[in-house]
Amino acid sequence: MALSKILPASQEQYAGARNLLTNGAFAISQRGTSFTAGGYSLDHWFVSQGGTCTLTQDTADVPTNFKYAAKVVTSAGSSFMSLYQPFESVDYEAFKNKTVTVSFYAKVNSTFSGTMFVDLETGDTADTLLGGTFTLNDPQTITPTTSWARYTASIAVGSTNGIRFVISPSAAQASGAEYSFTGVQLEIGEQATPF
């Protein structure tokens, strides 16, 4: 029997996997729950950093209906962490030359300054996270607040050899800055659906 015959019509759009990212709620943490250096961290998320920061799998301060968030705390001036997730070329074919929409929940503390951005960076080498040269593609900026809120942005994706998702502060932060996010979802099309 087809799945659409089982689900009510109002739920058919939610059948199957919509999220192109893995571990968007940061629930899987096989490598540990606290990271102070660049490299792979919470499953499928790669960290690039400048200065001194700690990324943790936070359980104390999360939005309603979530159990975990990724939380970055800076402990020196001019510090930041960016989180990346690469795509293999076979997966990238599904959204090449299309518009995708990213949605996520974010929160910062009062020390955080400026904005954050999300993008699908494009590269000249397929199937790699760090190889070749990556450049910003269509960065979308949001201004997070000290309360949890959901943000959405649409990104135009072109044709490229390599691609990776990034979420990052737009500038390095002072010591004591905190920023958290969860429910990170990337979907084909221009409309965000519930996580």
Image: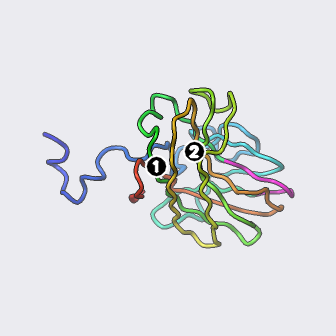
> Image height check: is 5 above or below 171?
above
Please provide percent x and percent y for residue 147: 60, 73
Mark 2 and mark 1 in contact (Cβ < 8 Å)?
yes
Relative image position of residue 100 (x, y in whole percent) = 46, 49
- Check the image and report above or below for 26 versus 67: above
Instruction: Tell me the quarter of the image containing the C terminus.
Output: bottom left
Above or below for 40 versus 149: above
Which of the 4 image quadrants contains residue 84? top right
Residue 76, magenta (yes or no)? yes
Residue ID at (61%, 52%)? 139
Give left or right: position of 90 versus 77.
left
Q: The N terminus lies in which quarter of the figure? A: top left
Read off the residue under disc 2.
Answer: 120
Which of the 4 quarters of the picture holds residue 133?
top right
> Residue at the location (61% across, 63% down)?
142
Range shown magenta: 74-82
Label 1 sits on residue: 100
Q: Amino acid at mark 1?
A: Val
